[in-house]
Each structure stands twice: as C-alpha cells, then as structure tokens.
Image (cartoon, helix red, strand yellow):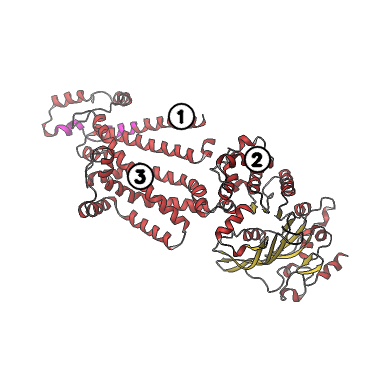
Amino acid sequence: MQFLAYILSRLVQMVPVLFLVVLIAFLAMELVPGDPIMLMLGGRANETMLAALHAEFGLDRPAVTRFFSFIVNALQGDLGTSIIQRQPVSVIVGERIEKTVFVIVYGAVLAVLVALPLAVIAAMKHDRPVDHAIRIGGMVGMSMPPFWLALLLILLFGLGLGWFPIGGYGEGFFGHLWHLFLPGLTIALFLSPILVASLRAAMLDVMGEDYIEVARSKGLSPRRIMFKHVLRNALIPAITVLSINIGWLLSGAVIVEYVFSIPGMGSLLVRSVGSRDYPVIQGLTVVFALFVMLTNLAADLSYMLVDRRVLRK
Amino acid sequence: MNSNNNPLLEVRGLVTEFSLEHGVIAANADVHIRVRAGETLGIVGESGSGKSVLCRAILRLIPSPPGLISAGEVLFDGTDLLALSEAEMRRVRGTRIKMVFQNPMTSLNPVRRIGDQITEGLSVHYGMGKAEARAEGVELLRRVGIPSPETRVREYPHQWSGGMLQRAVIAMAMAGEPQLLLADEPTTALDVTIQDQILALLLELQERTHMAMLLVSHDLAVVAETCDQVAVMYAGRIMESASTKALFEAPMHPYTVGLMNSIPDMAGTAARLVPIPGQPPDLLHLAPGCPFAPRCVHASPDCAETPIALSEIAPGHHTACLHPERISAGAS
C-alpha cells in the first residue's frame, strides 16, 4: 500500500511540471521572431497564401486559444503538424523515440556494467596503484569529447577491425544491439567515469560507517561486506548521478546519432532546427521533458527499492 | 576445558600503534589483562585512554594503516590470536568472540532487515539455512526481550528505538553463543533508564551462557555494579588492576583515587567532588616514566623518568605506581 501511495504521489507531482514544460515550449515558439509560414514559403509568399496557411495551421487565432487547444490536442496525442514534412508531429517523433531511447538505455546499461566492477575494485583497493589507474583512465575517458570518441571507435572497431557496423539501426532486438554497439559504447565511455567516481566516493563513505565495523566484527569477509553491506548503501548517490546524466544524454544523443547516422530524435532535432520546423521542435521538447521526468520517476522508485527509509516521508 | 585458574583471555604486553601526521602514538602501551570464563572484567578510564582500541586489537579490527599491533600476545583459550591467518581470525570473530558497540543507532545497516543482520554470522559460519536462521533470529530477539519478535524480525533499523537496537546488537553478538563478549561502552549512548536494563540483560545472558565479558566503560558506577575484576587504563596503559572489591575499597594508584573522587557520590555530600588537575595526556609527547606523573598529587621527581610496570602489591592486586605507599598514607 505504501508503495502504491508513493508511486501515485510521484505521478501527481509530474502533472504541474509537465504543464510548465508545455507552456514554455509553446511560448518559445510564440516568442521566436519571424513567421514560420513566411519562412516556409520563402520568397514566394503573397498575402492570400499567407492568410490561407495561417488559417490552415490555426495561426490566425489568439495565442491563449491556441495554447489551450495545443494542450487539449497534446493530451490526445496530437502534437500538431510538421510545416516541412506535412505529417503529424506525433508520427514523425513517434517512429524515432524508440531508437533514441534504445541508444541511451543501451549506453547507460553498458556504462553500469563497466562502472560497477571498476568502482568496487577502486574502493576495495583504495589508494593502491589499481585505484589510481582506474581514476586516471576515467579522466582520460571523460576528457575526450563524445564526437571524437565516436570517430575513434569507428576508425578502430568499424573500419580498422571490422567488428561492428558503423551506422544504422539494424533489424530486431539483437540487430539493434549489434548495430548500436559503437554508439552505446561511446555513451558508456563518457558516462562510466562519472559513475565510477560517484560510486567509489559513496562506497568509501559507507566503508567508514559503524555498521561496517560491526559487520567485520561478525567475521564476514571483505567481499561479503562489500556486496551485502557497502554496495547497496552506495547505490543511492550513484542512481542520482545516473538519472541526471541520462536526462542530459538526450542532448548528447544528437551528436552520437548524427555521427553514427541513427534515425533518432537527435538527428530529427538537428534537421528541424535547421528548417525552423517549430511544431516538430515543440513536440520534441515535450517528449524530451517527458523522458527526463520518467527517468527521475524511475530513479525515485529505485531509491525506494534500495532503502525503505525513503517511504517514511 | 578451562580450569578456574587458566584465563580464557590473556593479553600480554600488547602494543598498538597509530601513525599520525605528526608521529607515532601508542594507543595501547604494554597492556596486560586476564579474563576467566564466566567472569566480567571492567576496563575504566577517560576518553582516549585506549579502552576501545584494546577491544578492537583483541578482535584484530584495527585498520592498518594507520594502526599496527607491534608487540604482545593475545592468548585466547591458549591460542595467540595475533598469530592466526586472517581467515582463521574471521572464524574466531564469527563464532567465539563477539563485540557490542557503543552506538546502537549506527551499528546496524539501515537498508537491511534486522533479522537478517542478526543471523548473518550464523549462515556464514555455521552454514545455517534461511528458514532455520530466521527461526533462530526470532529466538535470539525473544531472548534479549524484544516483544513480538516474529514480526519485528522483518523490520528495519529506523523503525526501532535506541534501546531496542542495542538489544538487537546484543542478540547479534549472542548468535552462536560466544565464549567472550567485548562490550565497548554498551550503555553510553542510551537513556539512563535504559542503561540499567541493558546491563541487567548482559549479566543475565552471561549467567546463562557462562561467557566471559570485557566491559569497557568510563563510568565507575557501572563497573562497580557489574564487574568481578577491574582494570584502570590511562594513556594506553593499565595503571591498576584488582578485584572490584579490592579496587574500590583500597585503590593503589593515584589515578584510580582521582577517578573515584571526581564522580558525584549519591549517598555522600556534594562538597567532596574533586576533579583531577591538569589535562589528559598528549600521547605524542610522553615522558619515559609514569604518564600520570604531571597530574599526580603524590608524584616525586623520579616518577616522570623511571619506566614503570605493573607489580603485584597484594594477591591479585596490581599497580603501576612507584609510590603506592603514599596513597595508603594519604588515605589513612
């Protein structure tokens, strides 16, 4: 019961946030100088065509009316029509959501798989050479810009060794895994040093707690203490770092999708900004916001699973 | 196994050093103690006198670095614990010597169920299965006086009060019936009303299992009530050790006398409160002789220069004072 109430309260909290995001996305389009219809028509514009297209896109109505109809439509899954592609935004964005989410989640999973063992080793061998090596390696990974890292990986594993494809989305789940390995790895190499650093610091903190000494006094081995007592307590700060970064990775996906020519939301965003396709940009903003909020919700739920004290509030 | 005269635990010449930024200090310097099965030895002394370090040194829980046990023997049932491998030592910690810590609020892992933590040692060291361990956890909680243990065994530490948590920590220590219990200020963090309950519980468990107990406390009253033997620590050394009766009736070290004079006597008059003059010792800058000499009312010039050792001045009564006769003279 407690769990359900907790989840419900989190979901309710999302509503005003989402409303604000939609409002800001709407205002941003409203405040942009120039007329999107004018842009679309370019030099061919004349009064009759402008008026006709304004009426077609509903731009002749007052802003407040349009905002509420935007919200009502958005609630029904209708995010408007692309000015350039003349297709519903929800369709254009919809077919790309999966690809971007796949790349990001893939990258995050790879990052956790890399970071977890490294952080455990670094914390257990605290201040020994292994620990320093892991930290220096992490600094190298973090200081390389993702687009550069992506190019290196393409050169090495794609063109050089020929192990992995260097672009495209692939067919089926395993096809995706195979095609998106290098993009995922790019994200992972960038993300895992951040995770290692936060996990290691959290673990060292926990290792100084009284209950760890109590665990040692029970005759438990260092390995058991690490996995049964330290790790779980160190997960909360790491989950926070991960969830913040996953949201942030959406903008990173722009670069990764571009370099690896993945037809996801990132490449769509680049194109739409270039052609001033405001309805698409607006739709993407709402979807990005929703994604970030869902990530945070997932993080909140994981806190609850890790530490029951969260429910007390 | 143990004849009455053979101590279960005998610490001989134990030296525990810590490397600090400005030099090396000996938190335990030449410590000697003995505890027999079924007996309680109280260790008293002010903060920083090395009592807690002694407990941790016996269990070899001193973090190294910066700590190092550099000399001495910890004989437990005839075996020198300092000579054991780490794996053998873990077995000793899991089965024969247990410890109860000062702060129950931080002694349990906040994200794991209390019952699982109590029986964790049983599954690791006795190969107990899940169901068996849970049943044993309920039984242990019942034994330390937790009401409705069947449901509470599944709860988390934040749902319990400090006094109940200390009972849980004691239950955890009693799992597997240890032969020796190290209790490091087990009541200091608790309300006064709870303190007596916890002490009574420890004594009751001791009576039932005939385990030996090392009770560390800065509280002379607690020690006087509960212990058979008392050792007084100062600056990492044992200054005096004797039976509780002998120590409280005829203390043979000026520091012991000072400690007794500096606690309020409920029965006597309040005017008798005499604090020990001076500051606690600076372990980095100790004179070669008696570390208490700078604060001692009976000290003579040779006290600070002559290395001291415990000597038996009455049967079973040891003191590390060069001039114990001055105390009796002062007292009479």
Residue B157 shows up from this direction: no
Circle nearer the viewer, 2 or 3: 2
Q: Secondary structure at mark 2?
A: helix
Residue indicated by mark 2: B139
Residue B242's x, y, as percent? Answer: 78, 62
Quadrant holding the N terminus of chain B = bottom right
Q: Chain of mark 3?
A: A
Which label was assigned to residue A8? 1
Disc 3 with disc 1 on a shared chain: yes
Residue B59 shows up from this direction: yes
Residue indicated by mark 3: A108
Q: CA distance from mark 2 to mark 3?
A: 45 Å
Q: CA distance from mark 3 to mark 1?
A: 26 Å
Q: Chain of mark 2?
A: B
- As drawn, is B273 to the left or to the right of A224? right
What main secondary structure does the magenta stretch of the protein show? Answer: helix
Within-10-Å neighbours for mark 2: few <14, some 14–19, many 20+? some
Q: Is residue B26 magenta?
A: no
Q: Secondary structure at mark 3?
A: helix
